[in-house]
């Protein structure tokens, strides 16, 4: 697990095992707020060990930016903490989390200690704020990757924990491309110092404008390309004709997962355009 201090009392963690998934923590005088958990129990427990023994505080709140397993299955390793998320995050985790976990536990015995712990404190619209020491956190909807996405802004530092609404390769399979475009445009207008992506490395201030343009360009390119080809080509032909590079991204992103995610984006977008399930 990689770890880095982003600003005073704000830390970032990144998995070395699964898809460069990230998490964060904001430290107050007496307690801490964790933003997302890592995919594997040992990494989440290592993060908790650092917070409790190196930073010397207990975790009082865990924020889920969305319901997907790699961001929420570590909730159970913070007993006594209040889990916060979007209302739909709670609903989706209850509906899909348990059967998904049971299937995963059959394949990976290391997940046997994981239990689904949905958010207890939720919001459905507008913004939620929280004060942590000298830091003001603002929770806002950030849809597109999923229908329950939220971001967390550390207001004083202009550091945004964007969840999966911002990634090295936008991923819309469980979301909506127009919502994702809106979320990325909003992020570009926020005047940020850093973007903590849900996966991948921290984006620094001087890199933000280019990263926003690149993500918007990719989303617009796949939208245009799928519309142009989906009616006259089979799905296989369509995917072969729309390369990730022609859409403005590299296949090396996310440790080589980008090409697979790109192909899934094309399939999902084709089905969305034609109203298929």
Image (cartoon, rainbow, N blue to C red):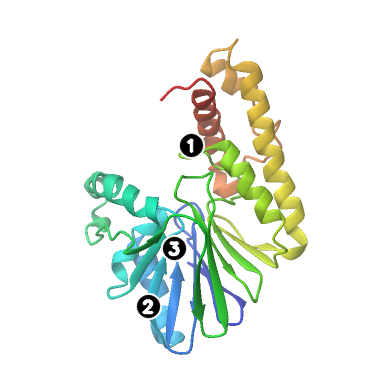
Alpha carbons under labels 1 and 2: distance apart: 32 Å
Tell me what residue is drawn at x 52 percent, y 36 percent: 260
Q: CA distance from mark 1 to mark 3?
A: 20 Å
Residue 60 is marked as: 2
User: Of label 1 and label 2, which has the lower sequence position?
Assistant: 2
Is residue 3 visible in this depiction of the protein? no
Q: Which mark is residue 10?
A: none
Q: Which residue position is annotated with label 3?
A: 36
Q: Earlier in the sequence, mark 2 or mark 3?
A: 3
Q: Residue at x 64, y 76 (%)?
A: 156
> Is residue 247 visible in the rendered structure shown here?
yes
Q: Is residue 263 above or below residue 27?
A: above
Mark 3 surroundings within 10 Å by alpha-carbon count, few (fewer than 14), some (14 through 19), many (20 or more): many
Q: Quadrant of residue 49?
A: bottom left
Question: Looking at the rendering, in which quadrant would you find the C terminus?
Answer: top left
Q: Name the disc covering residue 173, or none.
A: 1
Which x, y percent locates residue 128? 49, 66
Tell which of 54 and 144 is nearer to you. Answer: 144
Residue at image coords 29%, 49%? 97
Alpha carbon separation for disc pair 2 and 3: 13 Å
């Amino acid at each position: 697990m990689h770890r880095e201090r982003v600003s005073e009392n704000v830390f970032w963690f990144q998995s070395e095992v699964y898809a460069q998934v990230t998490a964060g923590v904001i430290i107050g005088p007496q307690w801490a707020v964790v933003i997302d958990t890592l995919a594997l129990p040992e990494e989440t427990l290592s993060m908790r060990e650092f917070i409790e023994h190196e930073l010397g505080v207990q975790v009082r709140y865990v924020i889920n930016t969305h319901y997907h397993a790699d961001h929420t299955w570590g909730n159970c390793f913070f007993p006594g903490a209040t889990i916060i998320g979007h209302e739909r995050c709670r609903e989706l985790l209850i509906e899909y989390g348990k059967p998904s976990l049971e299937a995963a536990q059959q394949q990976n015995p290391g997940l046997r200690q994981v239990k689904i712990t949905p958010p207890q404190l939720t919001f459905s619209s507008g913004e939620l704020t929280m004060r942590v020491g000298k830091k003001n956190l603002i929770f806002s909807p950030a849809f597109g990757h999923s229908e329950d996405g939220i971001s967390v802004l550390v207001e004083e530092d202009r550091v945004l924990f964007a969840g999966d609404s911002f990634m090295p390769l936008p991923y819309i399979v469980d979301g909506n491309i127009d919502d994702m475009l809106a979320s990325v445009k909003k992020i570009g207008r926020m005047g940020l110092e850093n973007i903590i992506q849900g996966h991948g490395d921290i984006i620094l201030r001087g890199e933000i404008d280019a990263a926003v343009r690149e993500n918007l360009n990719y989303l617009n390119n796949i939208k245009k390309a799928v519309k142009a080809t989906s009616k006259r080509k089979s799905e296989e032909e369509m995917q072969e004709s729309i390369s990730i590079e022609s859409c403005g991204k590299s296949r090396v992103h996310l440790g080589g997962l980008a090409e697979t995610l790109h192909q899934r984006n094309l399939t999902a977008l084709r089905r969305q355009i034609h109203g298929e399930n």
